[in-house]
Amino acid sequence: MVRIYRGRRTDSGATVVTVDGTRVLLPDAGALAVRFDWGQASAGSTALARALLLDHLDALPARSVLHRFAFTTVQTWTEDRWTCTMFELDAALRHVQQQLRLTCPLCADTGRREVTARLWRACACRPLQPEA
């Protein structure tokens, strides 16, 4: 099944983002105080990029990937409504990886990926080697 993300601004200015028309996408715990936004450089655009990629990848992306994705994708959506399929997210993510010359969007080729703000784990793309 193709996952479809949709965002819209209501008449009151609130933003609503859904996945497959039913499930409402919410900011993750790291960005709860921030309202989703798009079409401009803002904390709301970064929060939306983070939530989209977290839902799509089922893991937090590397910060460099997150910020480039927000800049090259979310901040370019200038209308009050937008639609993005999982395939379009994949293409945008591949473009970001090419721009940053990365193979892994989760760890940015470091071998370590962020699980929470203070917890890091070895990435499946390249497990950490023990330090000598």
Image: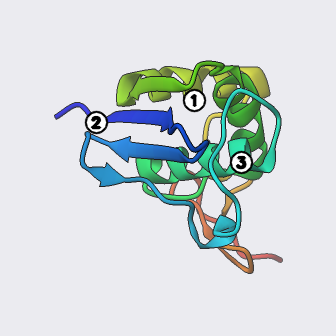
Q: Residue at x 48, y 24 (%)?
A: 82
- Please tell me which residue lies in front, 85 or 106: 85
Depth check: give the residue in front, 62 or 76.
Answer: 76
Q: Which residue is mark 3?
A: 44
The three-letter code of the residue at mark 1 reads: Leu
Secondary element at tag 2 = loop
Real-space Cα separation, disc 1 to disc 2, in angstroms: 15 Å
The disc placed on residue 3 is 2
Disc ID at residue 93 = 1
- Residue 33 sits in which quadrant? bottom right
Amino acid at circle 2:
Arg
Cα–Cα span, label 2 and label 3: 22 Å
Q: First in sequence: mark 3 or mark 1?
A: 3
Callout in the foreground (3, 1): 3
Viewed as shown, does residue 86 lie left or right of 127?
Answer: left
- Which residue is at a point 70% across and 27% down the rendered structure image? 39
User: Percent position (x, y) of residue 69?
Assistant: 68, 33
In this rendering, is residue 59 above or below 42? below
Residue 18 falls left or right of residue 16: left
Q: Residue 127 at what x, y percent from top left?
A: 59, 63
2 or 3: mark nearer the eye: 3
Q: Residue at x 72, y 75 (%)?
A: 130
